[in-house]
Image (spheres, rainbow, N blue to C red):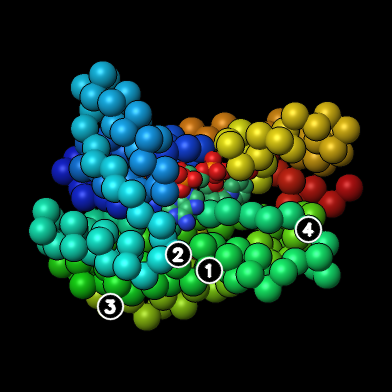
Amino acid sequence: MWNLTDKTALITGGTKGIGRATVLEFLNLGAKVLFTARNEDDIIEFENELKAQNLNATGLVSDVSIAEDRMHLKDWIEENWNTLDILVNNAGVNIRKKAMDYSEEEVQKVLNINLYAPFQLSRLLQPFLINSKNATVINIGSVAGSQDVGTGTPYAMAKAGLLQQTRSLAVEWAEMGIRVNAVSPWFTKTSLTKGLLGEEERMRPIIERTPLKRVAEAEEMASIISFLAMEKSSYITGQNIIADGGMSINAI
Ligand SMILES: NC(=O)c1ccc[n+]([C@@H]2O[C@H](COP(=O)([O-])OP(=O)(O)OC[C@H]3O[C@@H](n4cnc5c(N)ncnc54)[C@H](OP(=O)(O)O)[C@@H]3O)[C@@H](O)[C@H]2O)c1
């Protein structure tokens, strides 16, 4: 079916950008949604916005990079659902610098949130994914994980690692009824890229290089994530869907 009726879903980083668009898309497709972020005000505001549209989702304050916070998510899921059909590891951050300019703390922060946290959260929630008997994990990567696009090396390393995490877990967890896939966006209009998107000089070569001649909308990522979450994609696992307007296959 082209819907997510009654599927239980956790989306990390659900208050802004791609995560927020995915919360909305999942709710409209009939899923039960738990989403996270660090900023409580943003969570409350989004929950209220959803209520005004007759949509219901639960938001929890949880920093994916903190073990105790991940444990709260596990406890919530255990108490409320005891199963999890869809996990979207979306929360991500970047610090853009030359390699030599990063402090050790900055490198660890970028690797922790983008690479280590998805691994830990996927492992922590594995028993609930197994309970689903038909679960999917969707990791949000980046084209920066496959080629250099000037994001800074730690982010690129983390996203490259996340793609291999996707492939390795897909193989290991297939027999448990868990599919694992990734979506790799190119420039998408979100708070993460707001600053850059406003810099016309820097954006010109990027748009020039992109055959579709524009950046993406967050909703265009949410629809791919939704497809991978549905049983309609039941024979796809270990894959990375590159959503880049054709940028990476454009050699000239
Ligand atoms: N936008 C793009 O062009 C682009 C391109 C390629 C890949 N991506 C990837 O797509 C994903 C989403 O990016 P986006 O552009 O939508 O970002 P965004 O607009 O900055 O939104 C990020 C969301 O994640 C939350 N978040 C950040 N750190 C968190 C943490 N440690 N724990 C829990 N929540 C956290 C944020 O809320 P709080 O700040 O309140 O925590 C927010 O809800 C990321 O993995 C990013 O790397 C984006």
Q: Nearer the viewer, mark 1 or mark 3?
A: 1
Q: Earlier in the sequence, mark 1 or mark 2?
A: 2
* Above or below, comparing residue 52 to residue 124 in the picture: above
Identify the element where label 3 is drawn: helix
Mark 1 → mark 2, Cα distance in angstroms:
6 Å
State if disc 4 and disc 3 touch (CB < 8 Å).
Answer: no
- At label 3, which amino acid type do we have? Glu
Q: Earlier in the sequence, mark 3 or mark 2?
A: 2
Quarter of the image where the N terminus is located? top left
Q: Nearer the viewer, mark 3 or mark 4?
A: 4
Neighbourhood count class around disc 1 (C-alpha, 10 Å): few under 14, some 14–19, many 20 upward: many
Mark 3 → mark 2, Cα distance in angstroms:
28 Å
Q: Earlier in the sequence, mark 1 or mark 3?
A: 1
Query: Looking at the image, which residue sits at the far top?
Result: 52
Residue hosting label 3: 175
Q: Is residue 54 left or right of residue 116?
A: left
Among the 4 quarters of the image, the one containing residue 66: bottom left
State if disc 1 and disc 4 touch (CB < 8 Å).
Answer: no
- At label 1, which amino acid type do we have? Asn
- At label 4, which amino acid type do we have? Lys
Neighbourhood count class around disc 4 (C-alpha, 10 Å): few under 14, some 14–19, many 20 upward: few
Residue hosting label 2: 65
State if disc 2 and disc 1 touch (CB < 8 Å).
Answer: yes
Residue depicted at 18% across the width and 57% down the height:
76
Among the 4 quarters of the image, the one containing residue 83: bottom left
Residue depicted at 71% across the width and 35% down the height:
195
Identify the element where label 4 is drawn: loop
Q: Earlier in the sequence, mark 4 or mark 1?
A: 4
Residue hosting label 4: 97
Distance from mark 2 CB to nearest ligand 1 atom below 8 Å: yes
- At label 2, which amino acid type do we have? Ser
Residue hosting label 1: 112
